[in-house]
Amino acid sequence: MFAPDFNAPKFTVVDLGTKKAGALDVFRKHGKMYFGLDAECRPDVCLGVDLADKYKDDVKKRGYRFRSADVLSEDFDWPSADFYLAFDFLEHLPSKEMSAAVLRTMLERARRGVWLRMPSFEQDGTGEKPLRDLGMRFAWTNWHGHPSHYLVSEAKSVIELVKPDAKVKHKHNKLIHNTHNQDVVPMDAPLDTRKYEPMEHGPKPWHKLDPPLIGQHEIIVQFDGS
């Protein structure tokens, strides 16, 4: 399904599910921290890929290249790039199997590294379990747009399989210190609830979360030589 076209254009960085290219902005500002000087690049060698053509003008205004495409299509040519990004993207794919397949191809096509950001779907003590014990959950867990509850362990298994010698950094973002956080909603909040609204969702109890829960995971994969 994901056979690469080795005659495809080459870029420094390709961002999947780019929307308004926020991940490309982050990469150009902070990429050197993880990947060294190889991450320095002009906007015109950065490509944002999104299924929705409506983002084209926003991305091009920033000086980036844009391609409207479905990465799951057999026609997608998987450009060669030093780096691939997927910020809040893998969970939007139809299944965990598709998330794993896309991540595998990112790792195969990137020459220097891959950078992921993933909302937490973990059901252990670092994720939703303490909230569920209190009758609450993360808001994003029940979004229709998140059919793939892709886990950190599943991503790391693919990375280990495809790039066993890569250096992997795992960061914890969006720490949730108490249940009054707007990302925490009652268990029976309607599907696709984005943020907690007291008038709409009713009261919820206050509890300190110690240690804080992890709302977002960041995985930076550096290949040999990065």
Image (spheres, grey):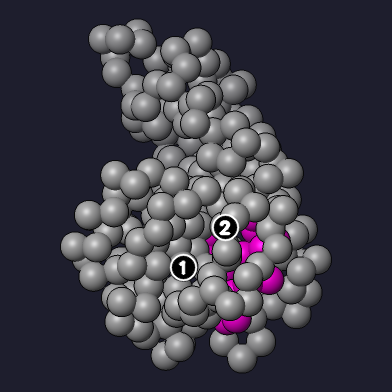
In the image, is 124 to the left or to the right of 147? right
Across and down, in percent, residue 217 comes to 53, 53
Closer to us: 76 or 140: 76
Residue at the disc numbered 1: 14
**Alpha-carbon distance for marks 1 and 2?**
13 Å
Q: Please tell me how crowded label 2 is: few (under 14), some (14-19), or many (20+) other residues with Cα within 10 Å.
A: some
Count of picture labels:
2
Tag nearer the camera, 1 or 2:
2
Name the residue rendered at 45%, 13% in the picture: 189
| Range of residues picked out in magenta | 102-116
Q: Is residue 9 above or below residue 128?
A: below
Which residue is drawn at the image coordinates 58% and 41% (left, top)? 93
Taking the magenta stretch, the answer to whether it contains residue 114 is yes
How many neighbours does mark 1 have within 10 angstroms: few (below 14), some (14-19), or many (20 or more)?
Answer: many
Looking at the rendered structure, which numbered label has been put on residue 76?
2
Q: Position of residue 178 (x, y in %)?
A: 41, 33
Residue at coordinates 29% horizontally, 75% vertically from top-left? 43
Left or right, 46 with respect to 110, comes to: left
- Residue shown at the point (40%, 21%) measured from the top left: 193
Q: Is residue 122 visible?
A: no
* Residue 61 image offset from top left, x and y in percent: 19, 62
